[in-house]
Image: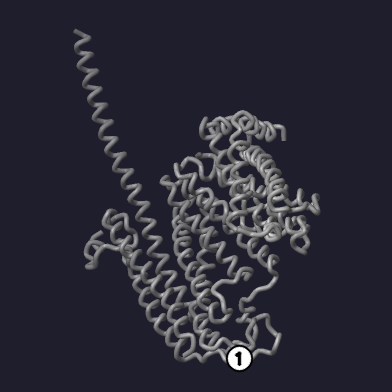
């Protein structure tokens, strides 16, 4: 556990110094919210009803960038090699990378949450549900994303292939997270906890798949 | 060797096997067309009001003839992607080139048939559902996402040139795609909790014998077409692998020749220097 | 026959797409075969 946290902290420290997420990816997510608002040309009631979906689409787009950044950090200084030689088992490397991505995604989501309250007039009617659903969805996205990120390493074209690998896989997460938020934001009459349960299941599936596959994938990055 | 050279036809990926499969496919297709358009009757069933989730109260009429191609194509799609998953497992398990090649071929043919499943389903849906597209239909959504996942898979394969790395990584991507299918199915099922699709038409007794026969015969015909495409696509993959290794071996031989020349040079050099040194 | 336009386009798209793909496979196969020595083409050297 300590090794995982040490790995995650390494990435978070790099972010604290470079501020790529804070100055580029978070503003990008806000730009998406504004774009939706302008493109849909909708009254505030419509935007409020659409807020759960728009929130998660914005999060998914931002997550592609966050994952690319998480991998770029390793390839720029070719630290994957060093990490591999450190002798830590592959699943711990995976968990560390995914944890760092998840923490950054949660920060992005917090800002986006503020964004939909201000811009779309959403109201957090069930904060516990919203936070639980967001955490579960974030673990799912960060896990799948960290695996696909490393799958796309070392091929020159990685910036273009990652979204096409990641986003189709993330559709169940999008559906479940949108439904859960629909309940939590009071825009849809359904049971958000059922969907949060599905999100939890997805988080477990992708985290397990990532932990198992990382060893296979990382040996020749 | 001599038999290969004495073959009269142009060198290709064809063989007796594909010839038989090809002829059988074409004949079967002709028979299938006769069954689908001439021998079977239009669907004139009358449903009890509300007995089915279908929006129809009467049968589909002649539109049912589209299902004679839609259903087999859809079945081949699922068989192809299943084959891809099996191949992916085999690659990770045994590092098998043969299975990697099979997985690649199955994915390519599968994407073609998946696209055709969506196209024929959409064309059938326009007169029957009164729309090209129905968000929330479980099978339509699952098939769409399957299509997108495997377009990504094929694109991903193209990004790698090292065949060993490609085999392993593609297997991971293919397997995660396959794991997703039941999840997608379940989540879309919950999402709308209804489907406009034919409710297990094959199981209830309302399907007439000839309709059922045509469906199953269509599946057999499209399985033959699938097999023909798979064999050719597999051989292409195999040839590509050969060209890679032939190129590699040629490079190695050339390199070896250079090295041995360099060594003999070095040896003669050292000899001459030794001779001069002894002087 | 009702829905004739839909029937023709549905069957047509399948038959045309499969035929185009089949021919493209044959062409790719021919081009590649020419670049590989005969002893490496298994299906041609076996007496099937």
In the depicted structure, whether residue A182 falls above or below residue A118: below
In the depicted structure, whether residue C48 falls above or below residue B176: below
**Observer-nearest of B61 and C39:** B61
x, y percent for residue B107: 48, 60
Q: Is residue B232 left or right of residue A144?
A: left
* SS label for mark 1: loop
Q: Is residue A15 left or right of residue C14?
A: right
Q: Dividing the image into 4 quarters, which one contains the N terminus of chain B?
A: bottom left
**Observer-nearest of A49 and B45:** A49
x, y percent for residue B105: 44, 60
In the depicted structure, whether residue B248 falls above or below residue B74: above
**Observer-nearest of B99 and A200:** A200
In the depicted structure, whether residue B222 falls above or below residue A7: below
Mark 1 Cα-neighbour bin, 10 Å: few <14, some 14–19, many ≥20:
some
Instruction: Identify the residue at image location x=21%, y=21%.
Output: B268
Which chain's residue wears label 1?
B
Q: Dividing the image into 4 quarters, which one contains the C terminus of chain B?
A: top left
Instruction: Identify the residue at image location x=61%, y=39%.
Output: A90
Q: Residue furthest top?
A: B279
x, y percent for residue B185: 64, 65
Specify how the rendered protein is coloured: one colour
Q: Quadrant of residue A47?
A: bottom right
Q: Is residue A14 visible?
A: yes
Instruction: Identify the residue at image location x=52%, y=90%.
Output: B42
Q: Is residue B93 visible?
A: no
x, y percent for residue A121: 73, 53
Q: How many marks?
A: 1
- Residue beneath label 1, please? B45
């Amino acid at each position: 556990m300590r090794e995982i946290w040490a790995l995650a902290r390494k990435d978070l420290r790099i972010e604290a110094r470079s501020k790529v997420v804070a100055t580029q990816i978070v503003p990008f997510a806000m730009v998406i919210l504004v774009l939706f608002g302008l493109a849909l040309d909708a009254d505030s009631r419509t935007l409020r009803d659409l807020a759960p979906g728009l929130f998660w689409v914005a999060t998914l787009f931002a997550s592609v960038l966050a994952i690319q950044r998480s991998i770029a950090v390793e390839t720029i200084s070719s630290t994957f090699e060093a990490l591999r030689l450190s002798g830590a088992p592959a699943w711990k490397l995976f968990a560390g990378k995914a944890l760092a991505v998840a923490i950054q995604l949660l920060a992005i989501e917090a800002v986006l949450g503020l964004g939909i309250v201000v811009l779309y007039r959403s109201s957090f009617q069930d904060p516990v549900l919203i936070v639980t659903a967001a955490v579960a969805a974030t673990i799912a996205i960060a896990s799948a994303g960290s695996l696909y990120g490393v799958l796309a390493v070392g091929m020159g074209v990685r910036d273009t292939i990652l979204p096409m690998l990641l986003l189709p896989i993330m559709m169940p997460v999008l559906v479940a997270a949108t439904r859960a938020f629909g309940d939590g934001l009071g825009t849809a009459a359904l049971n958000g906890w059922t969907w949060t349960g599905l999100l939890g299941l997805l988080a477990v599936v992708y985290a397990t798949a990532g932990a198992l596959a990382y060893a296979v994938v990382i040996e020749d990055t | 060797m001599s038999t290969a050279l004495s073959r009269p036809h142009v060198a290709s990926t064809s063989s007796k096997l594909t010839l038989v499969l090809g002829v059988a496919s074409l004949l079967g297709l002709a028979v299938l067309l006769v069954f689908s358009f001439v021998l079977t009757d239009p669907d004139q069933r009358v449903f009890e009001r509300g007995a089915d989730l279908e929006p129809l109260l009467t049968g589909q009429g002649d539109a049912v003839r589209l299902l004679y191609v839609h259903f087999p194509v859809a079945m081949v799609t699922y068989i192809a992607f299943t084959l891809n998953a099996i191949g992916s497992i085999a690659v990770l398990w045994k590092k098998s080139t043969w299975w990697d090649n099979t997985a690649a071929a199955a994915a390519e043919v599968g994407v073609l048939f998946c696209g055709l499943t969506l196209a024929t389903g959409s064309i059938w849906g326009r007169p029957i559902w009164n729309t090209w597209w129905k968000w929330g239909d479980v099978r339509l959504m699952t098939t769409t996402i399957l299509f997108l996942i495997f377009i990504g898979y094929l694109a991903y394969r193209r990004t790698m040139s090292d065949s060993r790395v490609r085999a392993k990584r593609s297997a991971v991507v293919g397997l995660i795609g396959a794991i997703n299918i039941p999840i997608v199915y379940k989540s879309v099922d919950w999402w709308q909790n209804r489907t406009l699709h034919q409710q297990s038409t094959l199981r209830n007794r309302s399907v007439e014998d000839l309709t059922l026969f045509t469906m199953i015969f269509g599946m057999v015909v499209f399985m033959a077409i699938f097999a023909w495409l798979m064999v050719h696509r597999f051989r292409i993959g195999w040839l590509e692998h050969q060209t890679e290794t032939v190129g590699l071996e040629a490079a190695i031989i050339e390199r070896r020749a250079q090295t041995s020349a360099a060594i003999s040079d070095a040896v003669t050099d050292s000899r001459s220097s030794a001779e001069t040194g002894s002087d | 026959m009702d829905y004739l336009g839909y029937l023709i386009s549905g069957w047509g798209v399948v038959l045309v797409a499969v035929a185009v793909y089949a021919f493209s496979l044959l062409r790719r196969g021919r081009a590649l075969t020419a670049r590989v020595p005969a002893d490496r083409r298994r299906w041609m050297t076996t007496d099937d």
